Amino acid sequence: MNQSERRQILLRSLLEEQPGYQNIKIPHGGDAQKKLLRSLMNVRTAAPISGEFQRIQDEYLQEENRSRGIVALSALTPVQKEIYLWRGDITRLACGAIVNAANSGMTGCYQPCHNCIDNCIHTYAGIQLRNYCSDLMEKQGHEEPTGTAKITPAFNLPCEYVIHTVGPIVQGQLTQRHCLQLASCYRSCLELADRKQIRSIAFCCISTGVFLFPNEEAAQIAVKTVKDYKAETGSKIEVIFNVYKELDEQIYRNLLG
């Protein structure tokens, strides 16, 4: 079975789930089909999937992830001892854990094809990730507090785990509370990774997107918190600062050398 055949099976299955989707026609072009598949996965609420659907989805996503190019930690060059800087799509990294900048609901972004990291991670991990997160949150019984973290399997991503953390939302002036909450995000992720004996972790630029934390201040907090944590605990965890924008890459290069 090739990718086109897998994709069309997945599309038909997702469209058949919802009576309101019955009039949606599967487009002919591959790119249009991929966009529709991602949209349907993004808006789908947590619910069980069949073993056959999961098998085909996993085969499809793993091939898609391979075709996008997997980047191993061993291919990166440290900028300081046990610290790396890499610009690219965090979902391509093969490392111990990648960090997701989640919202307090912790079940992903439901906006079709939104380009936030939460959406991308859930898209390429597969439907199991939302189901797993939903089970976690149902057991918890309340939204995830800002500055804390949860760990999940990575499912179809090339990393081993995803650590989800809720960063502060800056509405108006940046405050000391925002800064302490952001530092807590980084420390909570590091503590959780070390408890799970994860050897490497890739941090995105937490809260700097739609959460509006200023990029320069966010990077300063990220670097300081990581270095302070490693100095205080003696942790040997390897840390990748993952950036997506040229602006953030330059900020981190100035901080790290």
Image: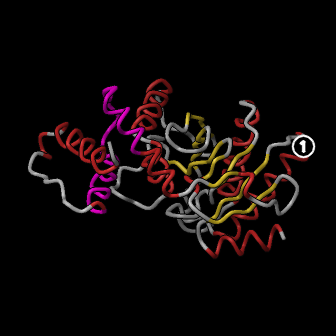
**What residue sits 35% from the left and 34% below the top?**
46
Which residue is identified by label 1?
232
| Near-viewer residue (154 or 60) | 60
Q: Is residue 17 above or below residue 40?
A: above
Image point (30%, 27%), residue name: 50
Q: Which residues are magenta?
A: 31-60
Q: Is residue 70 above or below residue 132?
A: below
Please identify the quarter of the rendering in which residue 33 is found: bottom left
Q: Provide residue 59's location: percent of width, then percent of height.
A: 41, 40
Judged left or right of residue 22, residue 143 is right
| Identity of the residue drawn at 27% across and 46% down | 5
Which residue does the image show at 41% across and 50% down from the upper left? 109
Q: Quadrant of residue 54?
A: top left
Whether residue 222 sits left or right of residue 170 in the image: it is right
- Picture coordinates of residue 161, whole percent (x, y): 60, 38
The kind of secondary structure the magenta stretch mainly shows is helix
Camera-side residue: 2 or 257? Answer: 2
